[in-house]
Amino acid sequence: QKEVEQNSGPLSVPEGAIASLNCTYSDRGSQSFFWYRQYSGKSPELIMSIYSNGDKEDGRFTAQLNKASQYVSLLIRDSQPSDSATYLCAVNGGGGSNYKLTFGKGTLLTVNP
Amino acid sequence: EPEVTQTPSHQVTQMGQEVILRCVPISNHLYFYWYRQILGQKVEFLVSFYNNEISEKSEIFDDQFSVERPDGSNFTLKIRSTKLEDSAMYFCASSVIPSNGELFFGEGSRLTVL
């Protein structure tokens, strides 16, 4: 059974600070890793994907992957109040499955003006 | 920008009734999915669908559930006899290819079973 674990938070940071979100996963065969943002009452929205070890940057967002440690993180630089949302870590692949995303429960981020 | 649309946005039903949730995936996408999220819980995979057949389903997707693509645009989830524990937000999603996990989600259909 694949598991994806995240600190539920809430994580509170001041506007302009760096927010750091972490995720671990249990299935070593997992191949693809994602961060989705979910505003309250809304659907998940993909913000980052990462497939190989190292860092991947996209604007204010940086995803980091360490497959040996089974660890994925998301850094949000210059955090804005509009970044306040729940951030979902999701994992795909492994165990013969290409079709199924396994989500963590999410970390609630609050950015204070 | 293309988007996944879902109807209804909210449905209230009595336990034991049949419910059909509808989705129109993005037009050039080939893979379709249903996920659900019970209030305060994780987003959970239900089923994936490709080339007019189920490609994978979860343990949640038992005989009470079915999916169909009745025409070239709609993708439906049917719950045959709803239970209280089926109350959740149901998200439809679609993707161009399955393995990269880059899903586009609809806004969801909230199902309340009384």
Image: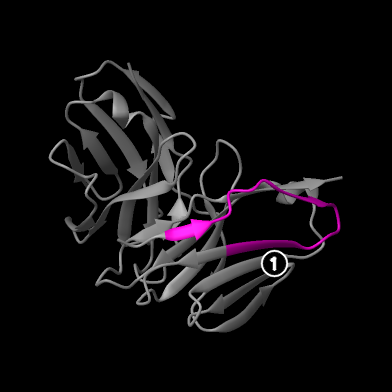
Residue B16 image-quadrant placement: top left
| Percent position of residue B92, x then y | 38, 46
**Amino acid at pointer 1:** Leu
Where does label 1 land, which residue? A75
- Residue at image position (44%, 38%) is B108
Residue B70 visible in this rendered orientation of the protein: no
| Percent position of residue B70, x then y | 20, 44
Count of picture labels:
1
Q: Out of A46 and A75, give the one closest to the viewer.
A: A75
Q: Out of A101 and B42, give the one closest to the viewer.
A: B42
| Percent position of residue B17, x then y | 21, 20
Q: Which residues are magenta?
A: A4-22
- Could you tell me which chain the residue with mark 1 belongs to? A
Residue A8 is covered by the magenta coloring: yes
| Percent position of residue A32, x then y | 44, 73
Please state if A27 lies on the left or on the right of B104 as rendered. Answer: left
Please state if B62 lies on the left or on the right of B42 as rendered. Answer: left
- Residue at image position (58%, 49%) is A8
Residue B2 is covered by the magenta coloring: no
Residue B38 visible in this rendered orientation of the protein: yes
